[in-house]
């Protein structure tokens, strides 16, 4: 499984690559999605992921890089990435692609980039102060 860092994802997002065409960030957080997200990411809650993975594969068949994450990218993000990759292989869907997991998840990403509206949206300091301090 390939991992990318927060800085690598920020570089991709700041480049001339077009979200949802050249790359897609898939956020598999469930109720912990509140409090902010990576700008332009698609929320596919892990609790519903198995039911929705075929649709996600179809929706992203022409996207060459799909990046998964959850809060910490220790369980839900890597598991969703593995399921997505296996499903995509089984369906032989789309263009050659790469699947990656955001190392340390949204928790580290928001710590580094919460003040950059081109990278993080809907950030709520009260959520992070109460849940992660």
Image (tube, rainbow, N blue to C red):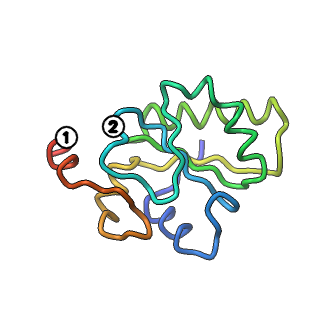
Q: Residue at x 69, y 50 (%)?
A: 98
Looking at the image, which is closer to me, 13 or 75? 13
Looking at the image, which is closer to me, 1 or 9? 9
Q: Earlier in the sequence, mark 1 or mark 2?
A: 2
Q: Residue at x 20, y 55 (%)?
A: 125
Where does the image place residue 12, in percent across and percent down from the top left? Answer: 56, 67
Question: For this view, does 113 lie left or right of residue 70?
Answer: left
- Residue ranking furthest to the front: 122
Residue 121 lies in quadrant: bottom left
Question: For this view, does 48 lie left or right of residue 92?
Answer: left
Would you call the spot at circle 1 few (<14 residues within 10 Å), some (14-19), or many (20 or more)?
few
User: Where 83 sits versus 99, above or below?
Assistant: above
Where does the image place residue 73, in percent across and percent down from the top left? Answer: 43, 40
Q: Residue at x 35, y 33 (%)?
A: 31
Badge 1 marks a residue whose secondary structure is helix
For mark 1, what is the residue? 131
User: Where 47 sits versus 119, above or below?
Assistant: above
User: Where 56 sits versus 60, above or below?
Assistant: above
Alpha carbon distance from label 1 to label 2: 9 Å
Badge 2 marks a residue whose secondary structure is helix
Question: For this view, does 72 lie left or right of residue 65?
Answer: left
Contact, CB < 8 Å: mark 1 with mark 2?
yes
For mark 2, what is the residue? 32
User: Where 19 sits versus 98, above or below?
Assistant: below
Question: For this view, does 108 lie left or right of residue 128?
Answer: right
Q: How many marks?
A: 2
Residue 71 lies in quadrant: top left
Where does the image place residue 128, in percent across and percent down from the top left? Answer: 22, 48
The label number, if any, that marks residue 54 in the structure image: none
Would you call the spot at circle 2 few (<14 residues within 10 Å), some (14-19), or many (20 or more)?
few
Q: Residue at x 33, y 53 (%)?
A: 108
Where does the image place residue 112, in percent across and percent down from the top left? Answer: 32, 63
């Amino acid at each position: 499984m390939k991992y990318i860092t927060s800085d690598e994802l920020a570089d991709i997002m700041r480049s001339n690559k077009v979200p949802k065409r050249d790359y897609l960030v898939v956020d598999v957080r469930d109720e912990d999605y509140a409090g902010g997200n990576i700008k332009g990411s698609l929320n596919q809650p892990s609790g519903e992921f198995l039911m929705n993975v075929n649709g996600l594969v179809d929706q992203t068949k022409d996207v060459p890089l799909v990046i998964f994450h959850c809060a910490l990218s220790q369980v839900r993000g890597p598991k969703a990435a593995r399921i997505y990759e296996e499903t995509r292989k089984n369906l032989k869907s789309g263009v050659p692609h790469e699947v990656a997991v955001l190392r340390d998840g949204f928790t580290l990403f928001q710590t580094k980039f919460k003040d950059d509206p081109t990278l993080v949206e809907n950030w709520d300091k009260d959520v992070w102060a109460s849940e992660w301090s």
